Amino acid sequence: MKKLLFYSTLFITLSSFAQAKFDQGMEQAFDLWKNDQPWEAANLFERISQAEKENWLPSFYVAQINVLYSFSEKNEEKLSAQLNKAQDFLNDAKSLSKDNAEILVLQAQLYTAWIVFDGAKYGMTMSPKISQLYEQAYQIEPDNPRVASGKVEWELGTARWFGKDTKPFCEDLQKAVNLFDTYEPKGKFYPNGGAEYARQSLAQNCKEE
């Protein structure tokens, strides 16, 4: 009985230590990102992912940084390196967390980055995939503001591309923006951004005449 109690106590202590170390590393990585050091943050997230092989979040953030900083990249070689790395880590995150709306949205954003770089080359093949990913994410978690705003942003952008009126999407975009005020992340370090961008989009695309 004493041995069982000892090993139980030891396990709890080691688990607590590991969790504290994980929390410290994640907080440090987010601090780097907030202080305009995204690539240093990505490197730290990558190291954390190597140590925390059962947690999808570090891999997700490696992928997210590489995706987000690809939208303004003009060098094809550098863009390909970033997005290919993002895809690798996104695949790792997918393997650890099935039917995850956040991961589906990031996959859609990755495909969008390819289209932004070369719409003529990637638009026809990747546009249907993006629409499908947003629809799938919305079926899983319709009250997630990143899902809702990403979906309507894509639909609005598609309408604009084909010269259609974008006003019909404004009500849905407003609803998506409102979700940022009420949505509670499912856990510590879970994705929680996007509100500022969504509000800017609402202001730019839905101005009152």
Image (tube, rainbow, N blue to C red):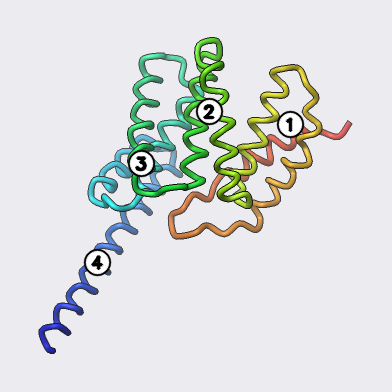
Q: Nearer the viewer, mark 2 or mark 1?
A: 2
Image quadrant containing the N terminus: bottom left
Residue located beneath label 4 in the image = 17
Which residue appears at 38% of the width and 31% of the height? Answer: 87
Q: Where is residue 181 in the image (x, y as percent from the top left)?
A: 66, 55
With 165 as the anchor, is 51 left or right in this view? left
Amino acid found under the numbered disc labelled 3 = Ala
At mark 2, the secondary structure is: helix
- Disc 1 or 3, which lies upstream in sequence? 3
Residue located beneath label 2 in the image = 129
Residue 204 is labelled as 1
Q: In this view, does 160 lie above or below 154?
A: above
Q: In this view, does 9 lie above or below 118?
A: below
Q: Position of residue 170 (x, y in %)?
A: 77, 37
At mark 4, the secondary structure is: helix
Amino acid found under the numbered disc labelled 4 = Phe
Which residue appears at 76% of the width and 35% of the height? Answer: 169
**Which quadrant holds residue 133?**
top right
Q: Is residue 83 above or below residue 107?
A: above
- Find the distance from the CA under tag 2 to the CA under tag 1: 26 Å
Characterize the local packing of mark 1: few (<14), some (14-19) or many (20 or more) Cα atoms within 10 angstroms.
few
Which residue appears at 25% of the width and 62% of the height? Answer: 18
Q: Are marks 2 and 1 in contact (CB under 8 Å)?
A: no
Q: In this view, does 102 lie above or below 181?
A: above
Residue located beneath label 3 in the image = 41
- Find the distance from the CA under tag 1 to the CA under tag 3: 31 Å
- Disc 2 or 4, which lies upstream in sequence? 4
Amino acid found under the numbered disc labelled 2 = Lys
